[in-house]
């Protein structure tokens, strides 16, 4: 009687889809489960492809293992990054690449460090990471790069750590672009409220730094009233705006560089129309598109998230399997400016 994937799944106690992903290296499966599936397939006489005759967990195949570490996995801006990771994973599975994705909901140093420790025990061939800027994360990434482990940073980057490449927006430059937009919207006068996510997020910090420098250098009649952290929370964004509009005089503009931007709507609903400040936000998500369409924001700066998820896996695979290194240390994605008219 023919041995099917379903029979292997029944024997191991997993789904047929898990068996399919394990045998063809197409998904996130623990090494222990993967080994059990291969053992069952051999014992039952399942005809494995020649390239899969050996158990990947035993280290005898040509499988390439690439770890990917992200945070804020449920945030709107991650939709496109995750789509890029998924498409690259599917394409590279045909080249024997297994992508192991570790995601956290928050900007959490302890959780990211735990992910890096777990991946360090899995004999990776490469690592793509959205790093959190803390001393412990820097130390661990430096140790991994010294092993040596090919490393690509995406979306955010840390200086001083050897890496093949960075893929993502030039966040400092995007902050300068935001300052230019705010100057146009306000007529170059007034005070700007800046809302960031977490002060440990290098990406947010670079945007704020670029914005502040351009304001200082180019627009002397504009100033920053405050920089406040929302921890990427919609409710916190709402509270920050409400408090600022009540207590800080001459707020003419608001820049939100992080997630939680839909909190703008509830805050503005409580204001009379003539007090509505100029607003610049980041990331083309469905909710943020609606803010533009409903005139709750004026400009949106998008960071081409798909490329940030897609390119690092191809860069690592080419470096590992073919020795092809990226031509530049940074692959900057486009800084796209959106209004409700060009969505």
Image: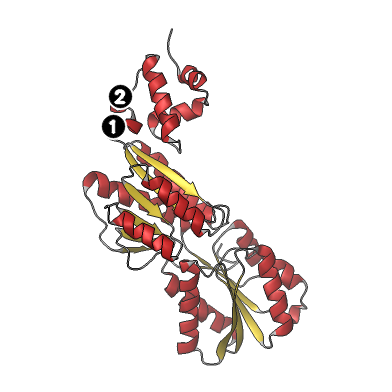
Q: Nearer the viewer, residue 294 or 253?
A: 253
Residue at position x 37%, y 39% in the image: 98
| CB-based contact (under 8 Å), mark 1 and mark 2 | yes
From the viewer's perspective, is residue 193 above or below residue 257?
below
The reply to whether residue 245 is in sight is yes
**Residue beneath disc 1:** 61
Looking at the image, is 163 positioned above or below residue 21? below
In the picture, measured across the screen, residue 129 lies left or right of residue 195, that is: left
Picture residue at 56% right of the left edge, 57% below the top? 106
* CA distance separating discs 1 and 2: 8 Å
Return the mark for residue 33: none
Q: Is 84 drawn above or below residue 301 in the view shown? A: above
Q: In x, y percent, where is residue 123?
A: 33, 42
Q: Nearer the viewer, residue 82 or 200?
A: 200
Q: Quick one: which residue is furthest to the bottom in this view?
A: 221
Q: Point out the image quarter for the C terminus.
A: bottom right
The picture places residue 101, in percent across and down from the top left corner, at 45, 45
Q: Vertical placement of 92 versus 309: above or below?
A: above
Residue 194 sits in quarter: bottom right
On the question of residue 295 being in view, the answer is: no
User: Which residue is disc 2 drawn over?
Assistant: 53
């Amino acid at each position: 009687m023919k041995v099917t994937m379903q029979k292997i799944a029944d024997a191991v106690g997993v789904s047929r889809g898990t068996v399919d992903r394990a045998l063809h290296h197409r998904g996130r499966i623990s090494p222990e489960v993967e080994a059990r599936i291969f053992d069952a397939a051999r014992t039952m006489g399942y005809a494995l492809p020649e390239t899969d005759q050996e158990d990947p967990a035993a280290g005898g195949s040509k499988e390439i293992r690439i770890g990917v570490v992200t945070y804020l996995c449920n945030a709107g801006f991650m939709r496109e990054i995750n789509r890029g990771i998924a498409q690259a994973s599917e394409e590279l599975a045909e080249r024997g690449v297994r992508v192991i994705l570790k995601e956290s909901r928050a900007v959490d140093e302890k959780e990211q460090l735990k992910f890096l420790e777990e991946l360090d025990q899995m004999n990776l061939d490469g690592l793509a990471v959205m790093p959190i800027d803390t001393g412990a994360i820097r130390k661990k990434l430096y140790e991994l790069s010294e092993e040596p482990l090919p490393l690509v940073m995406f979306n955010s980057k840390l200086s001083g750590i050897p890496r093949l490449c960075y893929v993502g927006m030039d966040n400092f430059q995007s902050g300068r672009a935001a300052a230019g937009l705010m100057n146009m919207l306000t007529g170059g006068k007034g005070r700007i409220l800046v809302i960031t996510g977490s002060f440990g997020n290098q990406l947010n910090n670079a945007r704020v730094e670029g914005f502040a420098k351009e304001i200082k250098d180019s627009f002397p009649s504009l100033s920053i009233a405050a920089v406040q952290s929302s921890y990427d929370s919609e409710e916190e964004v709402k509270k920050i705006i409400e408090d600022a509009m009540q207590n800080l005089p001459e707020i003419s503009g608001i820049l939100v560089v992080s997630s939680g931007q839909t909190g703008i709507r509830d805050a503005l609903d409580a204001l009379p129309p003539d007090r509505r400040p100029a607003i610049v936000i980041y990331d083309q998500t469905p909710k943020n598109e609606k803010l533009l369409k409903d005139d709750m924001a004026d400009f949106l700066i998008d960071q081409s998230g798909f490329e940030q998820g897609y390119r690092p896996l191809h860069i690592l695979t080419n470096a590992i399997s073919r020795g092809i290194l990226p031509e530049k240390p940074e692959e900057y994605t486009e800084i796209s400016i959106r209004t409700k008219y060009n969505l």
